[in-house]
Image: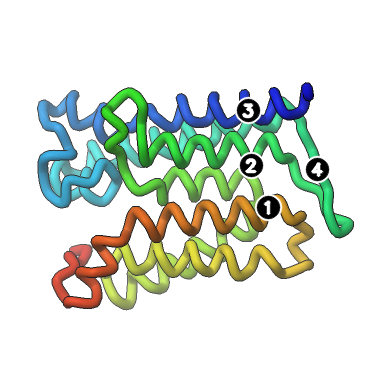
């Protein structure tokens, strides 16, 4: 019972931290609601396009920081579970998932947030930095070759699910559930981007 309460607490804390949508906050400092400009997405890419590099840097740091803090709290709660000879900190996974969900559907901003990719990367770095770097490599390779940030994000999320089943990483079944949830959220939030990719109207990143 105590473990369940801790896991629920981890989800709640992660969600409340994730709901501090940095792009919306920084946009208001700049006198703009980022959700009404550009692609209308409250995330890093749109902040870069609409607000500029300095604002985008603040968004970058904020989105990473809230994911890290949420995970540290989840790790502190210390609820572990094992399956198939592998073990994971379930409270850490719960807090990380909560942070990503909060970023996407923030309670403070009418449940209209970003797409969770950057916070998701921060969370994955806290959980398994090797897998995070591999996924980041896939993202960079796709974006560098196509200039589609959305395509890079989707490919990295799907790659994450695929490698979560590789035994060498030593993760339990709970981690794979976490991986499927994160990938589903990323793909779901990018469904309009997917349509534009197929129609050839998706915006490309200008380096």
> Which circle's residue, 4 or 3, is located before the other in the chain?
3
Marks 3 and 1, how far apart at CA: 17 Å
Q: Which mark is residue 81?
A: 4
Nearest the viewer among 157 and 69 is 157
User: Where's the N terminus, which quadrant?
Assistant: top right
Q: Which mark is residue 93?
A: 2
Which one is closest to the eye, mark 3 or mark 1? 3
Specify whether 85 is left or right of 138: right
Circle 1: is it few (<14), some (14-19), or many (20+) Cα within 10 Å? many
Q: Which residue ends up furthest to the right in the rendered image? A: 85
Residue to which mark 1 is pinned: 175
Where 91 sits versus 48, above or below?
above
The percent coordinates of residue 73 (x first, y second) are 63, 26
> Which circle's residue, 2 or 4, is located before the other in the chain?
4
> Which circle's residue, 3 or 2, is located before the other in the chain?
3
> Which circle's residue, 3 or 1, is located before the other in the chain?
3
> Which circle's residue, 1 or 2, is located before the other in the chain?
2
Residue displayed at 74% across by 40% down? 89
Marks 1 and 4, how far apart at CA: 10 Å
Residue displayed at 83% across by 53% down? 83
Where 53 sits versus 95, above or below?
below
Circle 3: is it few (<14), some (14-19), or many (20+) Cα within 10 Å? some
Marks 3 and 2, how far apart at CA: 11 Å
Marks 2 and 4, how far apart at CA: 11 Å
Marks 4 and 3, how far apart at CA: 15 Å
Nearest the viewer among 14 and 53 is 14
The percent coordinates of residue 108 (x first, y second) are 32, 23
Circle 2: is it few (<14), some (14-19), or many (20+) Cα within 10 Å? many
Query: Is there CB contact under 8 Å for labels 1 and 2?
Result: yes
> Which circle's residue, 1 or 4, is located before the other in the chain?
4
Query: Is there CB contact under 8 Å for labels 3 and 2?
Result: no
Residue to which mark 3 is pinned: 8
């Amino acid at each position: 019972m105590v473990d369940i309460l801790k896991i629920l607490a981890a989800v709640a804390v992660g969600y409340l931290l994730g709901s501090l949508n940095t792009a919306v906050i920084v946009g208001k400092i700049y006198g703009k609601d980022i959700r009404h400009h550009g692609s209308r997405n409250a995330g890093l890419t749109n902040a870069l396009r609409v607000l500029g590099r300095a604002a985008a840097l603040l968004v970058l740091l904020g989105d990473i920081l809230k994911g890290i803090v949420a995970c540290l709290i989840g790790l502190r709660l210390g609820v572990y579970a094992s399956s198939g000879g592998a073990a994971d900190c379930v409270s850490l996974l719960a807090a990380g998932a909560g942070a990503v969900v909060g970023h996407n559907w923030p309670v403070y901003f009418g449940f209209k947030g970003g797409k969770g990719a950057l916070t998701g990367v921060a969370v994955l770095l806290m959980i398994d930095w090797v897998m995070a770097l591999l996924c980041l490599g896939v993202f960079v390779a796709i974006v560098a070759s196509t200039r589609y940030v959305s395509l890079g994000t989707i490919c990295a999320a799907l790659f994450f699910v695929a490698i979560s089943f590789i035994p060498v990483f030593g993760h339990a079944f709970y981690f794979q559930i976490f991986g499927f949830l994160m990938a589903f959220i990323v793909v779901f939030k990018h469904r309009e981007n997917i349509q534009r990719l197929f129609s050839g109207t998706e915006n490309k990143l200008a380096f």
